[in-house]
């Protein structure tokens, strides 16, 4: 899936604390629907929208000082949190399974003078993300909109951050699969929930890996 013509894109200015981003996005995300890709993996071009969770997470990250923190964004879409993290001093990898999202994220980073790495990678085949773990910070906005993402992310996230080190920052607008995910994630993570800056609908979840429980000796 590619965006062939510049006139298929529109520019948005997104105001974050201390930072105005000029972001190109597809004018008509529905025009990107690709029946073949949908039949293969039920792939829908959700990456192409400017979702409230992405904006809220970018706002939350823009207020941080990341001092070289190794930062990974999952399901980055238009990648606003990645841009905010890179400007805050993080060493950032923005990832998504949609190659068109990643091409546009790289182009938007270049247009805003932001340095980051981009990576096409699916949570179902996450070797390239896991090989580079542990990450100091993992960002994810509105990635729990479908139930099929719940087991994938429950399996993946504990492999990306280490106990006692690093954290996952998840932004969610109240999707039903997110409730199931958060319930089950408590086994591996301590969870703290906060309001998101500038949004009444999005919540931010700070997730820290629990130390593994020592095995009980057999009697
Ligand atoms: C609702 S969009 C959110 C996009 C962006 N984070 C935001 O908040 O604006 C969900 C994103 O997750 C990505 N995604 C969905 N399933 C994925 C998978 N299995 N592996 C990697 N990325 C995936 C989609 O391509 C899309 O960019």
Image (cartoon, rainbow, N blue to C red):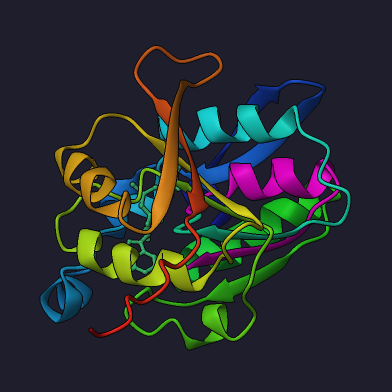
Q: Residue 49, how many percent across, how many down?
A: 40, 42
Left-right relation of 119 to 3: right
Quarter of the image where the N terminus is located: bottom left
Q: From which residue to which does the magenta span run?
A: 77-96
Q: How far across and how far down the image is residue 185, in percent? A: 31, 53
User: Is 124 in front, or is 83?
Assistant: 124
Instruction: Name the one closer to the observer, 55 or 151.
Output: 151
Q: Is residue 99 above or below residue 53?
A: below
On the rendered image, what quadrant is the C terminus found in?
Answer: bottom left
Q: Whereabouts is ligand 1, in terms of quadrant? A: bottom left
Q: Closer to the camera, 55 or 103?
A: 55
Q: Is residue 97 visible?
A: no
From this view, report whether residue 138 is shown above or below residue 206.
Answer: below
Q: Residue furthest left?
A: 39
Residue 73 magenta-drawn? Answer: no
Name the residue located 16 percent from the left edge and 63 percent from the top edge: 148
Instruction: Give me the residue at 44% from left, 45% from top.
Output: 190
Q: Quadrant of residue 217?
A: bottom left
Q: Quadrant of residue 64?
A: top right
Residue 83 in the magenta stretch? The answer is yes
Q: Residue at x 15, y 69 (%)?
A: 42
* Left-right relation of 152 to 193: left
Name of the residue lying farthest toward the front: 219
Residue 173 in percent (x, y) is at 32, 30
């Amino acid at each position: 899936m590619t965006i062939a013509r510049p006139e298929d894109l529109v520019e948005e200015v997104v105001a974050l604390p201390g930072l105005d981003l000029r972001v190109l996005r597809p004018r008509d995300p529905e025009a990107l629907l690709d029946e073949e890709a949908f039949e293969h993996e039920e792939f829908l071009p959700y990456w192409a929208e400017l979702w409230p969770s992405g904006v809220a997470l970018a706002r939350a990250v823009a207020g941080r000082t990341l001092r070289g923190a190794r930062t990974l964004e999952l399901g980055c879409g238009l990648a606003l949190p990645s841009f905010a993290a890179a400007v805050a001093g993080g060493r950032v990898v923005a990832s998504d399974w949609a190659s068109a999202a990643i091409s546009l994220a790289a182009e938007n980073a270049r247009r805003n003078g932001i340095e980051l790495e981009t990576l096409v990678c699916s949570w179902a085949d996450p070797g390239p993300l896991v090989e580079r773990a542990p990450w100091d910070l993992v960002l994810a906005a509105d990635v729990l909109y479908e139930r099929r993402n719940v087991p994938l992310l429950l399996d993946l996230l504990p492999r990306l951050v280490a106990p006692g080190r690093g954290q996952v920052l998840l932004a969610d607008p109240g999707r039903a699969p997110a409730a199931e995910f958060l319930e089950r994630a408590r086994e591996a993570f301590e969870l703290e929930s906060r309001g998101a800056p500038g949004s009444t609908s999005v919540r931010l979840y700070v997730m820290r890996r629990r130390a593994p429980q020592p095995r009980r000796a057999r009697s």
